[in-house]
Image: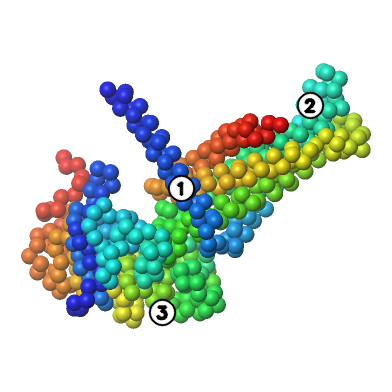
Amino acid sequence: MSTDKHIVLNDVHKSFGPKSVLNGVNLEIGRRESVVVIGGSGTGKSVMLKCILGLLHPDSGSIKIGGTEVSGLRGRKLDEVLATMGMLFQGAALFDSLKVWENVAFGLIQGKKMDRAKARDIAFDKLAQVGLKADVGELSPAELSGGMQKRVGLARAIATDPEIIFFDEPTTGLDPIMGDVINDLIVHCVKATGATAVSITHDMASARKIADRIAMIYRGEIIWQGTAAEIDNSGNEYVDQFIHGRADGPIQMDILKA
Amino acid sequence: MNFLAVIGQVVLAAFTDVGRLAVFVQNAVRHCITPPIYPRLILQQMIRIGYNSLPVVGLTAFFTGGVLALQIYIGGSRFNAESLVSSIVALGITRELGPVLAGLMVAGRVSAAIAAEIGTMRVTEQIDALVTLATNPFKYLVAPRLIAAVITLPILVAIADTIGIMGGYIVGTKSLGFNSGVYIKNTVDFIEYQDVFSGLAKSAVFGFIIALMGCYHGYNSQGGAQGVGRATTNAVVSASILILASNYIMTSLLFNT
């Protein structure tokens, strides 16, 4: 594991109105490391990710990327930071007004002002990397299956050769086999580009496959972290309950009990 | 106590909305006038907002011109002033009915479409995706629509004016028995440049309102399909009301000569 810290979250707080979602998140992610944050629905995973990306501004605390404070950045400065990142969204979030290849090339053409023809070549290259044939590039995203959309989303995320790639529930909504295909692609793409990877998921099979290190978030705090191998002997009853998917345990779902 | 709390909540919510809209407008306008500007996207939106609205606006103008001729003929005949039909049709269409009716029709068509499109992009995280691809959604989504609407609405209204006057002419000559030459001469003699330009200037403001309401409600929509539906309704209703209200204000302030 590298000692070079790429992303450092220090005591990050975020609340929406009276509802506090992040209660002091502390997390350090090394360069070229793949960290998976696990946790149930509504525990603050997505909010944490959006804070790192600058889509949400934390109420307090610091988020450093490569040593630079990014929380509170706006406008062009935020764009500069974002240009070093890629993200695969849960629902792929492809632009349905554009063709598949234009989606993949979007960050190159709009973000990096690359020539269209050159960006198109790179887009088809990236599509091939995620196992899609060239003719898919001319289709519109609505014509693709969920698994294919995820692959296009992955191609778009890696198109600009980002230093950090975020994965928001990469396998959610896919069948187990397609989920595993996506996991393999993620591992492969992260290795190939040498990027730092941050994923959030509640799919343990996916977490075990793509993580160097796993951190568990519960009620807006990181309650445990360790290597992927350590998770089965974490000695943490919250983690044990989560990875075995038991309804009984210290984690109580916010549902009305009879 | 409870009653007072409710009043307080309503007032606070209203101020919040006004404030949020003001910030949105400021952002939107700033991105309209600072580079980069996307001519391709503006052109695309001009075709959607302008060209595709032609049938609706044209038909509205045609029938309005026709009905105006009929009504003014009936009203005018009570004062033996039937000969005024052509000039009043021209005045009414260019100063008021052309811009307002075209504005309302386009509000129904375009505000709804913009709100639905941007709202869907919001709830499917496409707007977040734009940001992560280092593209400002105001620049890429809002600015082209605003610019396109402000440019195309006056063009649409100029066409609507022409078709509306023609509708009056057809009814006037074919069913009310006016002489074609006299009708055209009366139209041209009475109408002034200012009548036309005041209408076109108002329509540019209507264009801004139409695109703004679509973008604003779409951009702030939340909560899935239902949220997008609500955004669409709000966009059309607020655009229509703002068009009518701003029309009154502009007419009374600027064009009362």
Name the one closer to the observer, A249 or A50: A50
Residue under pointer 1:
B24
Q: Which quadrant of the figure contains the N terminus of chain A?
A: bottom left
Name the one closer to the observer, A23 or B235: A23
Residue under pointer 3:
A129
Task: Quadrant for residue B205, please give it.
Answer: top right
- Residue B88 shown left or right of residue A170 in the figure: right
> Which of the two discs, 3 and 2, sits closer to the camera?
2
**Residue at image location 91% in from the left, 35% down from the top:** B182
Q: Which quadrant of the figure contains the C terminus of chain A?
A: top left
Q: Is residue B113 above or below residue A187?
A: above
- Numbered badge on residue B72: 2
Q: CA distance from mark 1 to mark 3?
A: 40 Å
Report helix, strand or loop for mark 1: helix
Name the one closer to the observer, B32 or A203: B32
> Residue B35 location, x and y as percent?
53, 62
- Residue A136 shown left or right of residue A186 in the figure: right
Task: Quadrant for residue A84, please give it.
Answer: bottom left
Tell me the crowding category of disc 3: few under 14, some 14 to 19, or many 20 or more residues within 10 angstroms, Cα based. Answer: some
> Residue A76 location, x and y as percent?
42, 63
Q: Is residue A86 above or below residue B99?
A: below
Name the chain letter of the residue that bears numbered label 3. A
Amino acid carrying label 2: it is Ile
Do labels 2 and 1 touch, CB within 8 Å?
no
